[in-house]
Amino acid sequence: MGNPRSESNKGDQVKFQEELKDNIRKALPELDVVIGWCGSFDPLHATPHFMRREEDIDKLEISPLSVHNLATYLPGLRGKKVGIVVKGCDSRSVVELLQENLINREDITIFGFPCTGVVDQSKIKKALGGHTGNIEFCDMSESVIVIKSEDKAYTLPMAEMLADKCSSCRYPDAVISDYFAGEKIGNKGEEDADYAAVETFENLSVPERFGYWLKEFDRCIRCYACRNACPLCVCRDHCAAESRDPHWLSQENNVRDKLMFQVIHAYHLAGRCTECGECQRACPVDIPVLMFKQKMNKEIRDTFQYEAGVDPEATPPLLSFKMKEENITEKVW
Amino acid sequence: MSWLEELARENKVFAPRYEGDAVIFAPFDPKQEISIKHAATMPPKKTVFPQSEKLVDFTYSKDPENLSRILIEAKEILPKGTTVVFGSRPCDVRGFTMFDRVYLAEKTTDVYYKARRENTSFITLACEKPETTCFCHWVDSSPSDASGSDVLATPIEDGYVLEPFSEKGQKLLTSSLLENGERWILEVKDVHENAAGFLANAPDLSQAPQKLLDVFDNMEFWENAAAKCLSCGACTYLCPSCYCFNITDETTGMKGTRFRSWDNCMSAQFTMEASGHNPRPTKAHRLKNRVGHKFSYYPAIHDGVISCCGCGRCIKSCPVGIDIREIVQEAINHEPAIGKE
């Protein structure tokens, strides 16, 4: 791409990818499966890759297209020996699952790598005029993405195509790992999580905010991809959304019922959600559902000075109990 | 006045437009731009088969003559009015021909479906270029297939050539706003042939129904195929040919409504029995049903017709990129392990 810096970085990427494959090769004989990513239906997409045999490892590809948070699969594989390749953010979901005893540490082998960010497919789609149905070619460096679509070439700045969570990422390396391929980038800064977007939204009036959600949720099809892609939505087949007894939600095509589910989801995730953004990424009709969880986490941060999925030894604040909370003034009876 | 505005005087008109970053079929509004350059994110399935529809309103009351008896008064709610859908794609509408075999069958006709189907017209746009996830040519269709549609609109240099494919379609084209398009008929043929030319040779799926039955009990095959599946309903709800539903009564006090709403075989509750037993306990069983239904069980009882229209939405909108084409081909190419069968 004519950019010496990006070329050398690309070299690094290839190098750590080989190291990662070697790590997996070493560990696989003791494991039932190792989950990573590989190429998908077009050059712009990756897909989760389940490696069971040595030859499966050759197909492993780590790139800014490795968007999926593979920790989602871990609770469903409980009892098996599972290896998992994690980005920094994904590793925080693993930590959270460990904290809550939803997975066993000794059953999980964690493969880390230095993550420089993953793309937001919606941003790329917008940059390509709303259409990514005919991608012919895609190549990436740390600074740009080069895409050929319908005989047109696009060179897009990587920084603008990254997921929002990546632009403000503070944990690019896995916070927990058994193997780490490549050089660690190191935690970026000590500043708090960035909730500027939530704050801007909070400044709108109640009718404006409610009007926004009524409009956004009008197109919700209740497929529950948001829920099923969430690594911490562990009720799985026993979700309140579909329960008839208790009867929390109606089957009517009603925006308020759809919104009600998001409220349930967000409350269940308060202080547990690591803001991996899988709920929003999975939504087939692009509803910005991550904001609910960010709002909850902002409150958790302000009330308990707690950040989810960083310390395996910590207990999420809403899963613990104190006789006297520092920042909650209890009602005097 | 535009043709769509004219149609909107007597019909409810749906056209695709952007809602957020998704393209959705919404009630036509001349003030809002329609988006017809590419296939919509959601097919117009809901126009004939709503996400949730009211079937019956009911009220309970006590029999004044005998207070231990509860009386139920029920009122059927049949859909009314005519609808025109503009900007659907051939695959979107062909899905309804698969519904028809089930809901308009001689023995059992679904009155709600029938009312909507008969009163909805589709003005379908022929595709100029298929996407990477398109595979309509695998399932006996093409980018200019008019089956199920009332009018096929083919884009040419400065507009569209509209061809009627039903009586309803002929009636739609009587508008004085339209001019005779016969002189462009050769160009139309070119557009259709050109689009078909983009599609590579399709694999032979004639063995798919039997091959899928052959792997029916091979859970290892299905566990591998479903390993990355999240068991959500995106594939099903975006599918133009998935027609399963659930029926629930939503009651408050003495009044209630019976709803029919979309259901999906990826859901844990899909075949949950009252006893608590679920014949499809895992996501592997569920994905097996989705693929098997479309490529094996449905064709077995419907003259070999595959109940997939090849629109590719289940591939491109799947949060984890499950590719139904791969699964079908793997089943076709699957060699039973020696000594196992």
Image (spheres, grey):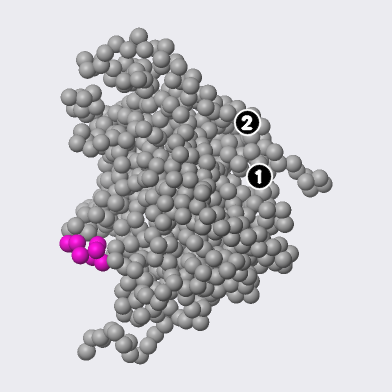
- Element at badge 2? loop
For residue B288, which numbered disc appears in the image? none
Residue at screen point 26% across, 67% down? A199
Report the Cα–Cα distance between label 2 and label 1: 21 Å
Amino acid type assigned to the residue bearing label 1 in the image: Phe
Residue A74's x, y, as percent? 56, 65
Residue A9's x, y, as percent? 54, 59
Could you tell whether B138 is left or right of A248 in the image? right
Residue B86's x, y, as percent? 32, 29
The chain to which mark 2 is attached is B
For residue B216, which numbered disc appears in the image? 1
Q: In the rendered image, which quarter is residue A83 located in? A: bottom right
Is label 2 on the same chain as label 1?
Answer: yes
The chain to which mark 1 is attached is B
Q: Start and end of the magenta stretch?
A: A199-205
Residue at screen point 38% across, 64% down? A265
**Does any portion of residue B29 appear in the rendered image?**
yes
- Element at badge 1? loop
Asked if the stretch drawn in magenta spans residue A200, the answer is yes
Give the answer, above or below, for where B172 lies relative to B72.
above
For residue B203, which numbered disc appears in the image? 2
Q: In this view of the protein, which residue sits in the foreground, A118 or A153?
A: A153
Q: In this view of the protein, which residue sits in the foreground, A309 or A331?
A: A309
Q: How many numbered callouts?
A: 2
Amino acid type assigned to the residue bearing label 2 in the image: Pro
Q: How crowded is mark 2: few (under 14 residues within 10 Å), some or many (20 or more)?
A: few
Residue at screen point 29% across, 66% down? A196
